[in-house]
Image: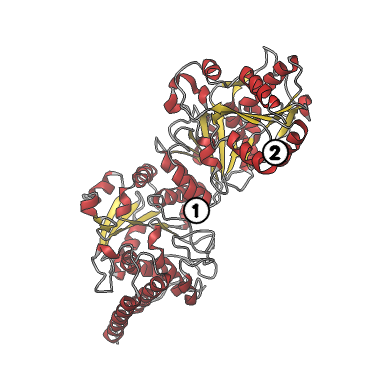
């Protein structure tokens, strides 16, 4: 069945990530508002999830045995839309409708608008709880034996929300081993660096204290993401949190590491510069693997 | 319809039972009818009457702990996988504390989670204002997609629970703490979105929701002694409001009194005021909490203190009848 078996090479995945980043820049420029840094930083994770890690079918988004992906930090949804278009859920041309009246691509994701989105999100801190509810439902239905997984992507700033830690406690209590969390550890939030706004460290220690197995990786390394997810699926006695260190704005030099790009889109000139840079990088990826 | 479907509610020996007991029985029955019915509670399993379900279906019950935000969002996750979750706590905490989670993950997300708020209203009594949830009707009523139900007694609560078990919309079920006179019988009809004429009359319409319908019927008896013929309508579903039944009655009587154990602003009285001002302007008096908090006291003391009894309803009825053009 199409896209239920993933057979992409690492260089093909890197090219896909590059294409997705170009889509993100283009759609944000067209929209004139939205978040740039987070989606670019998350691109390698989403590429790994949609083109290698997850069981899913763009032709049958509500396939009963699919893996579930929740985007708890809904403001990063441009990366999900761009990746879904790349995977064939809908035509890439639709990406330019982002944030427009009547679009299926709402500013923050709405489940009922677009098939393939599992939840409505935006207000932070609710994704992990919903993942827990889904995992509990699978356990009630004895579906965990089918090896169905619930992946949930969380922002690091989002971890300021108490709701997240209520869910962390619950997952630890019920040993929800088919929940795999991925924290986008990019160290920025709207008011500045996370450790200035509200320190999160010792982040690994916090999750371990709540009964989670923790894996730390470079979240901009596609292979590392794939390996970490495979490792996470092998942990049977605990839920797993992958702390993925990412570079906000990854792939666009003037956006990288700059928290001002957290909530801003590129203008026309900036988009041109960004796309030029990404296309140059694409050429490098192609020649490296030839 | 009317009194043939009611118990001998006005007799001293009339049975009383906490409304939540009916909820507990309904949930157990719903669980037997459908294996997709599941439940979660925030450390109040016995006092929200979920213990019957928990004992029968331990694998379909989730103990969340004292975490109401998690309660409703876990509920949204269960619903996303095809479950019909009933999630309960005291109304002061759920939906008191977790409104935004309910808005985003249940209403906008359009998942059939049943938020069950027990111990709602002033009759919580000695626990005082912190635990007397009076704003929940307003908070839930304003949310798109949300159904809001406040049953009048335990028998109706059981029917409402069973009705919600097969409904697909997000819903809030409001339950009172105290033992409440049982008005209805197993034969009394209940349908989500329907209001019921419990007593026919022509001079004034008394609209009660939840436990206040009992006081409306008692007020109608008092009014009869004054020569006033009151119509009593029980409105268990606050949203969607049965506009047809209410407006039809107002065509006949020309004046109305609402009563609720909640804030009149934005509450059931607010809903009726919105309806009548748009569709059939008429003198209206809203019995309920008048933009203030409660305090500790015995339930019946508080009901009298805050004007939530038959005597005050009767006074209000005289008042609106005088205002008729």
The x and y percentages for residue A37 are 31, 66
Q: In which quadrant of the rendered view does residue B191 lie?
A: top right
- Is B269 on the left-hand or right-hand side of B194? left
Q: Which residue is pictured at 34% across the width and 49% down the height?
A: A238
Q: Which mark is in front, 1 or 2? A: 2
Could you tell me which secondary element the residue under label 1 belongs to? loop
Q: Which mark is residue B194?
A: 2
Q: How is the image coloured?
A: secondary structure
- Is A82 on the left-hand or right-hand side of A101? left
User: On the image, numbered disc 1 is attached to which residue?
Assistant: A143
How many angstroms separate mark 1 from mark 2 (CA)?
39 Å
Residue closest to the eye, B25 or A248:
A248
The x and y percentages for residue B208 are 65, 29
Residue closest to the eye, A113 or B18:
A113
Decide: is B320 above or below A169.
Answer: above
Label 1 neighbour load within 10 Å: few <14, some 14-19, many 20+: some
Q: Seen from this angle, which residue lies furthest top?
A: B12
Residue B118 in view in this figure = yes
The x and y percentages for residue B266 are 54, 37
Q: Which residue is pictured at 47% across the width and 16% down the height?
A: B297
The x and y percentages for residue A57 are 50, 68
Residue closest to the eye, A92 or A202:
A92
């Amino acid at each position: 069945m199409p896209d239920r078996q993933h057979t992409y090479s690492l260089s093909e995945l890197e090219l896909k990530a590059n294409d997705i980043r170009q889509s993100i820049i283009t759609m944000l420029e067209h929209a004139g508002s939205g978040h740039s840094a987070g989606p670019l930083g998350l691109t390698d994770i989403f590429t790994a999830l949609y083109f290698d890690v997850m069981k899913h079918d763009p032709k049958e988004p509500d396939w009963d045995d699919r893996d579930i992906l929740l985007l708890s930090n809904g403001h990063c949804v441009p990366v999900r839309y761009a990746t879904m278009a790349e995977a064939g859920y809908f035509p890439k041309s639709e990406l330019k409708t982002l944030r427009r009246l009547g679009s299926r691509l709402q500013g923050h994701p709405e489940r009922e608008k677009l098939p393939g989105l599992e939840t409505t999100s935006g207000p932070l801190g609710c994704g992990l709880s919903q993942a827990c509810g889904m995992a509990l439902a699978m356990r009630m239905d004895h579906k965990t034996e089918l090896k169905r997984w619930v992946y949930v992507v969380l922002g690091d700033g989002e971890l300021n929300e108490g709701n997240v830690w209520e869910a962390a406690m619950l997952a630890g209590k019920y040993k929800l081993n088919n929940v795999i969390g991925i924290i986008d550890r990019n160290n920025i939030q709207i008011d500045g660096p996370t450790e200035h706004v509200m320190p999160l460290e010792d982040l690994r220690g916090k999750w371990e204290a709540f009964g989670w197995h923790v894996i730390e990786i470079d979240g901009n390394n596609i292979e590392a993401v794939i390996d970490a997810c495979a490792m996470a699926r092998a942990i049977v006695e605990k839920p797993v949190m992958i702390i993925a260190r990412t570079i906000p704005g990854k792939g666009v030099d003037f956006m990288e590491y700059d928290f001002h790009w957290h909530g801003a889109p590129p203008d026309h000139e900036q988009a041109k510069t960004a796309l030029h840079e990404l296309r140059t990088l694409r050429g490098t990826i192609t020649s490296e693997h030839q | 319809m009317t009194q043939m479907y009611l118990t001998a509610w006005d007799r001293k020996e009339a049975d009383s039972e906490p409304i939540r007991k009916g909820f507990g029985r309904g949930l157990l029955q719903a669980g037997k009818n459908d294996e997709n019915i599941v439940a979660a509670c925030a450390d109040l399993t016995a006092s929200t009457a979920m213990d019957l379900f928990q004992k029968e279906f331990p694998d379909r019950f989730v103990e969340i702990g004292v975490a109401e935000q998690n309660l409703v969002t876990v509920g949204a996750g269960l619903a996303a996988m095809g479950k019909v979750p009933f999630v309960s706590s005291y109304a002061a905490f759920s939906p008191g504390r977790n409104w935004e989670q309910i808005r985003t993950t249940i209403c906008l997300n359009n998942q059939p989670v049943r938020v069950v708020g027990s111990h709602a209203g002033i009759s919580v009594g000695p626990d005082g204002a912190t635990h007397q949830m009076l704003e929940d009707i307003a908070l839930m009523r304003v949310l798109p997609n949300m159904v809001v139900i406040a049953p009048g007694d335990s028998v109706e609560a059981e029917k409402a629970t069973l009705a919600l078990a097969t409904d697909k919309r997000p819903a809030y079920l409001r339950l009172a703490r105290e033992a409440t006179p049982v008005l209805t019988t197993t034969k009394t009809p209940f349908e989500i979105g329907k209001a019921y004429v419990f007593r026919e009359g022509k001079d004034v319409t008394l609209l009660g929701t939840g436990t206040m319908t009992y006081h409306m019927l008692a007020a109608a008896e008092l009014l009869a002694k004054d020569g006033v013929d009151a119509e009593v309508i029980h409105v268990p579903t606050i949203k969607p409001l049965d506009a047809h039944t209410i407006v039809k009655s107002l065509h006949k009587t020309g004046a109305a009194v609402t009563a609720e154990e909640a804030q009149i602003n934005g509450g059931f009285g607010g809903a009726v005021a919105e309806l009548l001002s748009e569709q059939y302007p008429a003198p209206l008096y809203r019995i309920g909490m008048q933009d203030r908090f409660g305090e500790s006291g015995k339930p019946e003391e508080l009901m009298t203190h805050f004007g939530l009894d038959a005597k005050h309803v009767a006074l209000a009825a005289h008042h609106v009848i005088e205002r008729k053009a």
